[in-house]
Image (spheres, helix red, strand yellow):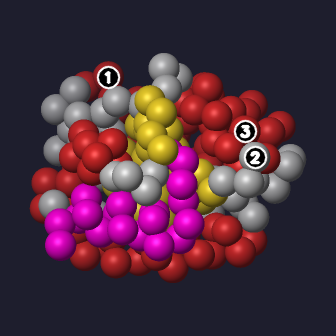
Amino acid sequence: MSVNETIVTDLINNGIEFVTTVPCKQLAGVIEQIDQSDQIFHIPSNKEDEGMGLCAGAFMGGKRSAIIMQNTAIGVTINTLATLIQYYHIPLPMLISYRGEIGEPVACQVEMAVHTKALLAQLNIPTYHFHHPDDANELDAILRHCFMCKKPVAILTDASFWKGA
């Protein structure tokens, strides 16, 4: 099974029925798999904070949700994470392409990589960093933990993870 298939299978096995995504070249394969799934309702978002609002609405309507996004927009989502997702104890898995690390071909992506982990730590959001395709085997447990403790979690997936996938 490919990494993309593993990710989508784990989402489905954890009862996630709604996923919103913001385009990213690294995430294109998993987004395509989600879009093709008949078990996940997929809505693309224009912005990450908008996507989090959609996920909150889905959760309040009784659906488990997840967002797939780039780390470059973490700064845009701070208010939404703190005053909506965390305040209302919404479990929100965030599969995040960690742009700006070693191997990043786009120079402007590097600046946000410097701040991503510190911002997530400041918000007390559990953060997991996937470097190798085998790291995807941890996703099921991370998702179960997210929904059990009713907190957002960040799964950072760097270029080496997707390159090996």
Label 1 with label 2: CB-CB less than 8 Å: no
Pointer 1 local density, CA inside 10 Å: few below 14, some 14–19, many at least 20: few
Specify the quadrant of the image occupied by residue 22: top left
Distance from the alpha carbon under mark 1 to that under mark 3: 33 Å
State the residue in front, 130 or 149: 149
> Among all residues in the image, which is located at the extreme right?
87
Secondary structure at badge 1 equals helix
Label 3 with label 2: CB-CB less than 8 Å: yes
Q: Is residue 132 above or below residue 34?
A: below
State the residue in front, 67 or 125: 67
For residue 108, which numbered disc appears in the image? Answer: 1
Q: What residue does disc 2 label?
A: 61
Q: Quadrant of the N terminus?
A: bottom left
| Span of residues in magenta | 1-19
Specify the quadrant of the image occupied by residue 81: top right
Q: In percent of the image, x 59 and y 51: which residue is there?
A: 65
Secondary structure at badge 2 equals loop
Identified by mark 3, the residue type is: Gly
Identified by mark 2, the residue type is: Gly
Q: Is residue 46 above or below residue 36?
A: above
Q: What residue does disc 3 label?
A: 57
State the residue in front, 51 or 119: 51
Percent position of residue 55, x then y: 64, 42
Distance from the alpha carbon under mark 1 to that under mark 2: 38 Å
Label 1 with label 3: CB-CB less than 8 Å: no
Identified by mark 1, the residue type is: Cys
10 inside magenta stretch: yes
Label 1 or label 2, whichever comes before in sequence order: 2
Q: In percent of the image, x 41 and y 70: which residue is there?
A: 10
127 inside magenta stretch: no
